[in-house]
Image (cartoon, grey):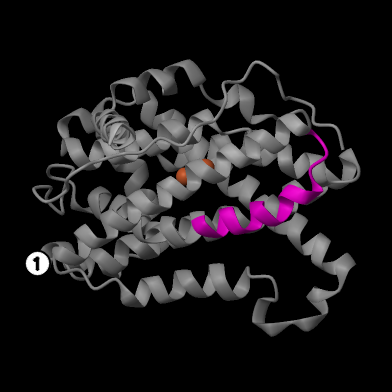
Amino acid sequence: MKTQGRSETRPRLQARRVAFDLSRSPLHWIPGDPLSSHLINGINLLLPAGELWFCRVYNQALPHITDPLLREEVQGFIRQEGMHAQAHRKAEKWLQDQGMDVTAYRRRVDFVFQQLLGDTPLGLKPLQHRWLARHWLIVRVGIVAAVEHFTGLLGDWCMNSESWDKADPVVADLFRWHLAEEVEHRSVAFDLFEHLCRTQAGFYLSRQALMALVFPLFLQFIAEGGRSLAGQDPDPQVRRLARRTTLRILLDIERIGRRNDNVPTFSLILGRTLRWIAPGFHPETEGDTAQALAYIARSPAANAGAKRAAQGALH
Ligand SMILES: [Fe+2]
Ligand SMILES: [Fe+2]
């Protein structure tokens, strides 16, 4: 199906190498805010498996794309997400070096992305049938589009927030570089999902159904990752945060976000998600590409990665 909101003037997506050293970064990298630090640290454990799953799904979708410009964007998207997964794998190692046991949470994440959302979830052989396999692929492309709505909105929040200026510069830059690229490629998943759906009605209804599924699961996974790390914190006061329910954590982030903007408020996440319901919604209006590219241009990790790549090319 022809996509509605795509423009031929979008910059070509490129994978940027990053180089960063987390060895001196503290676990509580947002000063005085262990809950926000752990919630965001937990995202490091979710991203490598999730983004590599994006890449697998998108590689399968490539042969079904009939629009050459969209195919090129999807290829750029795959390269960027692959790089993100690598960077956050390093951050996962940093958490392990600080004594965090990540195996239990990682096992749950891997189960979701490798088993439940794999080609034959829970060994369901009928999904190997050509027709079903194609529809299961489109459903997964739709799930990626819904998740990318969150990465795009978090990116837009991050590009407009200055609270992390007071945080550990290496961790803050790792997430800011990543989130800037999320803003840069925020429309690709949506456009691909629209392209693969047969009708506008089918596209609209399935994108609403998938968001209804992804919205609570996304929040649950973020809360769970934060709890899994907070529960191992050396400070017993912080360990008590691990007993908080997901609802309580959402109320906490509402309070923290309003007070010092260390995390986006729950009301911002909810409000931006409700915009997805509009039939004419398109992610293009949900962020500022020039602002994101300006961040990447000054990102220490992206600059160090570019320098290293250039040196590598010379040798
Ligand atoms: Fe990403
Ligand atoms: Fe992304």
Residue 212 appears in the picture as rendered:
no
Percent x, y for residue 67?
Answer: 80, 34
Q: Is residue 117 left or right of residue 89?
A: right
Our reading of the magenta stretch's main secondary structure is helix
Q: Residue at x 27, y 54 (%)?
A: 91
Q: Residue at x 27, y 48 (%)?
A: 36
Residue at the limit of the structure toward the front, as seen here: 315
Q: Is residue 296 magenta?
A: no
Q: Residues within 10 Å of mark 1 (few under 14, many from 20)?
A: few
Q: Residue at x 61, y 73 (%)?
A: 116
Viewer-side residue, 310 vs 73 = 310
Percent x, y for residue 266?
Answer: 44, 43
Q: Is residue 59 magenta?
A: yes
The residue where tag 1 is placed is 234
**Which residues are the magenta region?**
52-67
Percent x, y for residue 74?
Answer: 64, 40
Q: Residue at x 76, y 33 (%)?
A: 68
